[in-house]
Amino acid sequence: MEIKAAVLVFPGTNGERDAYFALQRNNFSVDYIWHDFDKSLEYDLICLPGGASFGDYLRPGAFAKHSEVTKSVEKYVSKNRGLVIGIGNGFQVLTEAGILPGALALNESNSFICKYVLVEITNFETPFTNSIISDEKIFKFPIACRYGRYEVNEKDINENQIVLKYVQNPNGSYENIAGIVNKDMNVFGTMLHIERAAHPLFGYGENNPIFESIRRFLSRE
Amino acid sequence: MNNSMNILQLALNLGLSNLEYNLIVERLGREPNEFEIYLFSAQWSEHCGYKHSKYYLKKLNTSFESENAGYVEIGDKVVVFKVESHNHPSAVEPYQGAATGIGGIVRDILAMGARPLALLNSLKFGELTKPKVNKIFKGVVSGISGYGNTIGIPTIAGEISFHDTYNNNPLTNVMCIGVADKNKLMSSRADGPDKLMVYVGSKTGPDGVHGASFASKEFGKEESIERPSIQVGDPFAEKNLIEASLEIMQIKAVKACQDMGAAGILSSTSEMAYKGNLGCELYLDKIPIRQEDIKPWEIMLSESQERMLFLIEKGSEEQIKKICDKYTIEFSVIGKTIKTPSYRVLEKEEGKVLADLPIEILVNAPEYYRNNTVPSSYYINRGRKIPEVEGSIDSVLKKLLGHPTLGSKRWVYEQYDYQVGTNTLIVPGDADSSAMWLKGTQKAIAVTIDSNELYTYLDPYEGTKNVVYEAARNLISIGAKPLAITDNLNFGNPENNEVSWQFERTIEGLISASVELCTPVVSGNVSFYNSYNDVSIYPTPVIGMVGEIEDVDKLLNMKFKSVDDEIYLIGKQQINVEKIGGSLFLYIIKDFIGGEMDTVNPLREIQLNKFILELIDNRVVKSVHDVSKGGILFAVVESCICSDFGFEGYIGSNVEELFGENQGMFIVSVSPTDSSKLEELAKSKNIEFRKLGKVVRKEKGINIGIENFDFNVLSNIYFNCIPKILEDHLC
Amino acid sequence: MKKDTVNKKFVFEIKLKLKEGILDPQGNVTYDILKKLNYPVEQVNFDKSIRLTINESNLQRANEIAEEIASNVLVNPVLEYYQIFQIQEE
Amino acid sequence: MKKDTVNKKFVFEIKLKLKEGILDPQGNVTYDILKKLNYPVEQVNFDKSIRLTINESNLQRANEIAEEIASNVLVNPVLEYYQIFQIQEE
Ligand SMILES: Nc1ncnc2c1ncn2[C@@H]1O[C@H](COP(=O)(O)OP(=O)(O)O)[C@@H](O)[C@H]1O
Ligand SMILES: [Mg+2]
């Protein structure tokens, strides 16, 4: 069964080709969607990739929330049409748009951080993690951002929405949170560049655990 | 009479000499008007006109004036690359200076029709403990991070060194690499008359007016001179410009492309037309401007960032405008090429003519050549006796690891996104060079950037050769075959005999090394007037080199891989302690520069390089690291630290043998089962080798027989080196 | 939204301040530097300040627009709150 | 610098504005977005605003300190100029 994924491209986005490559390698069929797209999104998976939409001016993701396609994503989510993931800037867009709770603030160090971190998967009961075929709970992924510090009001997030936690907090994120889902568990956002774990040449396994889980989840339906 | 006095005075104020002014009058056969003098002052500045370097650069075996960047072919791809400096702007405003430096070199690559895929940089700063230097350092690094990361081009490698010669003249050299399909390269040459010159990108403001002539002056004097209005980078506009340009260049009606760099509209339009043996006509009212009160000459000279010039066939305007609208950037037809070889600037079409100049006079700045004599400092330096280094090996090693030139640059490269684009196969800190995968193939592009101001100061000719060979060794170390060179020649005041001599000898060294290694110089840049109060920096040629990796699965880094692997020194075996002049440890420990420097033996080197590549190709070795700054012990320690292993063996018995620098050496590690194979191969190829020791667990430390170092102690000094200095000298 | 009346210009400053309890890394870094330089500072806060020139027929409308821009576009309510000031351009 | 007198707290706002002619990319892009959303804006400028709490014995000393901090540490004189305001903390 063909699983269709869309990679959204905002002005300034620069991780779209990385997301495309990773999704393709994980057997999705992929299209790019430019940000002025205001029709309904007929895809099984929507990916908001990393980068710096609108130059990250004002705040990362702050302007992308006004793009037509973001409204389309909102509808897509409320209709429960499929799954949505936001990576890095994509996560920032989702929080700015209120599709995911919380916000991403300036790193504690006041500077950009690009490095590998270890994260623990804390909830295996989401579409993004429930088919991970590994006994491992700890994974290595890269981060690359200046605004990666996750902040949220305690009351806006439930424990089971927290999917990934840093083993060692790199940026001051609340409760070591590295990735979350919404209450309906059809939207996932993370500051980890999971799409960069796309090939053994980059020091990862043949398959990406998260994309693999998404694909399994979607093909089961 | 009065008027022509004023024009001459203006010319002098703008940095032209009396002689040059007379030359202009003579060539034109008339007095230039005020507007035209502005044009000449920029186009004939050192930065645009290459007045003091043209004569020498012509000797390089390359057609250097033709295009925005050079290239090599790998498979059915073309790899385009160039290095460029932004030294003066970085001294005045480090963040924006570095940021706009990135923007500029990226547009050079883009102008060739290639997608920019990776960045490297070579940075030079004074003593980091000085508040001023400290600020410049932090500013430059965050400028590169802020701009490079935002446009989504990874910064994958680089080099940084700290020396007091750069206290007032930091160097920011940035290199960019792009890839295009073989038949898709774009030219900057106008291919016929009556084609439209199209302006694409951000609006024009008064930014960097005088930038070109500013880069052609030295600091110190005339401190009060009006600062050029600083160029501010807009990475979002750049990203839009990149995507728009790549789309525009797919259109057949697009004939040529040129970035607007130094002397912006003026030099891009004039050079594009001139290269096609044509003239051009520009209409000033068509140029998108940011503020109403900008003067005509400011528009021409402005170095506002994020702008490109295209030459297109009539009729394709709408198609191109649509792309610009999509990316929210300006589009405007600003003029056209004409048959008459004149450079004409009009207020508006059919309007007042502001300038009408024979284009070849405008574009061809005079060429200066000096009969250089060898400065006495050269002999004096060589004659200086290399001092005794007292103190234990332990204390010397710790000092080196804690010196920012040798300590880890992690604090820097963690601020660069080195992975966006997912082509980066070697991340910073893991090897002597980096590699970019050509997705869809087994091949990769290897890249490195290198310099050594101590070597090139002691002996510009041999020093430059050493640097080029070291760049080659860096590529060899990861398994790449060196293909071509780009160079950035950072020098002091070229009107000074010593500097002029250094420049000439550097070019000669560059030519000889590039010929020997079969790596032509395909692009480059010259930066003069890096001086302060009449003191010039050490001559600093920076060499960028690109190589090819046949099979990505064979890529190697410098990390040791497993306990009990054996470690060999391949190549030259005994440090000639008579020839360790220019070694970094002498500068760090004794503040000494002088003495006899080791030089490369081309035949031996080339043999050695071939041998190392063979070892890698046959998967005999598991890691390779070239021996360079800091000598043999430092190379071994670095491999240990970055791989979390210890060492046990013997390297040498005194400070000179352990830290002295000679040419032509590699450290390799090999599994015990393969060591005999390695030895046999080396013998059959007549390559010298010596077993230094073996890899052990890090808990056992780094044991060199005469001394045993605690792994964690060394590792901490190495990784905390820069953060510690910044912390201790917070400002 | 077009009006026939002649429009005037109003300039507002929208100030975005971090909410109580939200870390201010820029403020902290600057504080450390100032302390090191021996300045008697007790606290440093970085705010964002955005100046808007608005074309409207009257102050009240302009005020409403500024309010709307601040709350819809500029502020991130998880991290920040805003204040609006009408200013005289100097 | 230490005084025996009891110190008071003074709060200042240092505002950093871009000099005439210096490009303001953030302001420009924000302007574009507001225009696209049909707000009647004519111009948008991004300034920096830094609040300093200073411990000093009297206002005049505090003022001098604020001045010194602004000019020595905060302002980037090639791009910006500064203004100092004494403020009442709300
Ligand atoms: N030191 C050098 N070595 C080789 N080529 C050089 C050198 N300096 C300049 N060039 C070449 O001269 C041309 C003009 O350089 P430059 O003025 O820097 O270009 P741009 O107009 O892109 O700024 C380019 O083709 C460049 O590669
Ligand atoms: Mg160019």
Image (cartoon, coloured by chain):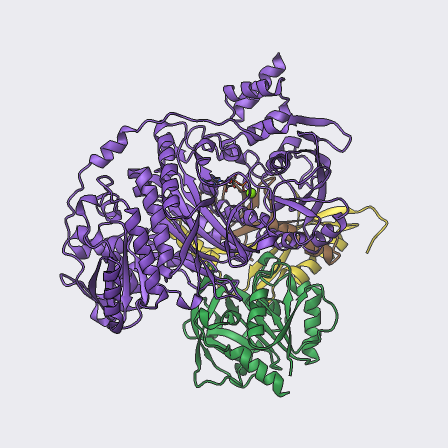
Chain colours: A green, B purple, C yellow, D brown
Q: Quadrant of ligand 2?
A: top right
Q: Depth check: B392 or C29 in front? A: B392
Judge whether residue A127 can be spotted in this image. Answer: no
User: Residue drawn 42% across and 63% down?
Assistant: B426
User: For this view, does A116 lie left or right of residue B623?
Assistant: right
User: For this view, does B496 lie left or right of residue D78?
Assistant: left
Instruction: Give the quarter of the figure containing the N terminus of chain B.
Output: top right
- Expressed as whole percent of the image width and height from the top left, the position of residue A77 reads 67, 77
Q: Quadrant of residue B181?
A: bottom right
Question: Outermost residue, right direction?
Answer: C4
Q: Depth check: D23 or B561 in front? A: B561
Q: Depth check: B124 or A29 in front? A: A29
Question: Outermost residue, bottom direction?
Answer: A220
- Expressed as whole percent of the image width and height from the top left, the position of residue B595 reads 21, 39
The answer to whether residue B501 is above or below residue D5 is above
User: For this view, does B228 lie left or right of residue B123?
Assistant: right
Total tally of numbered discs in the picture: 0
- Expressed as whole percent of the image width and height from the top left, the position of residue B92 reads 47, 40
The answer to whether residue C89 is above or below residue B567 is above
- Expressed as whole percent of the image width and height from the top left, the position of residue B701 reads 21, 67
User: Residue drawn 58% across and 65% down?
Assistant: A17
User: Residue drawn 16% across and 57% down?
Assistant: B652
User: For this view, does B283 lie left or right of residue B436?
Assistant: right
